[in-house]
Amino acid sequence: METKQKKFRFNIVDVVVIVIVIAVIAVFAMKFIDKRQTATGGGVRNVEFTVVCDAMAKELYEAAVETLPAQMAASGQYVNGTVVSAYAEPCKVKEIEVRDVGTQNRTYILEPEDEYYTVTFTCTAQLDSSSILNELGTQEIRIGKTHYVKTDTIEFVGTISSFKVTE
């Protein structure tokens, strides 16, 4: 008995399927390459911004300055930002509001005797230049926004007061 070998011939449907598969692979490859370029420095812009924290106790300021410069963190991970320095100016505080989270009771300490400062943190970061959101970790960097200055040893809440792109 003789076995016949079937010759495989391409028809138009086979060609169309092959072209579609190649196009899908090319699209996924381009997306993967673009993400790798952003992560390795392609499409990144360097920025500098300042965050002003009002009415910080002298002891907190002194402890924070000892840890600087420090890499910034968000959601339990380091981000591409650094808290470079901090500058303090004395400020007067007439009262401090203390809120009990559990009961929502408020206590006011009138004219505290300790020294307080308005502290300006200078930060640098690398942001994705393809996005208009200016995201650093889970936060957006925009003048006037509330910002958590957070490293592995400090965390303060302030307001972004300046923002500039650096070279």
Image (cartoon, rainbow, N blue to C red):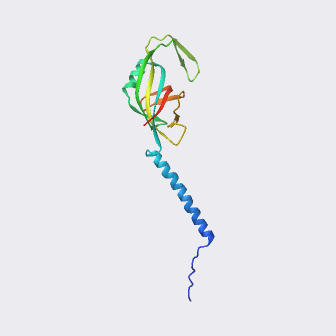
In the rendered image, the vertical position of residue 111 relative to residue 60, given as above or below: above
Residue at the extreme left = 66
In the rendered image, the vertical position of residue 139 relative to residue 89, given as above or below: below
36 lies left or right of 133: left
* Residue 103 percent across, percent down from the top left: 58, 21
Comparing 150 with 106, the one in front is: 150
Quarter of the figure that contains the N terminus? bottom right
Q: How many marks?
A: 0
Comparing 44 with 35, the one in front is: 44
In the rendered image, the vertical position of residue 149 relative to residue 32, given as above or below: above
* Residue 127 percent across, percent down from the top left: 48, 39
Residue at the extreme front = 167
118 lies left or right of 8: left
Q: Residue at x 60, y 65 (%)?
A: 17
Quarter of the figure that contains the C terminus? top left
Residue at the extreme right = 13
In the rendered image, the vertical position of residue 30 relative to residue 80, given as above or below: below
Q: Residue at x 57, y 66 (%)?
A: 18
* Residue 35 percent across, percent down from the top left: 49, 48
* Residue 142 percent across, percent down from the top left: 53, 31
Q: Residue at x 44, y 31 (%)?
A: 123
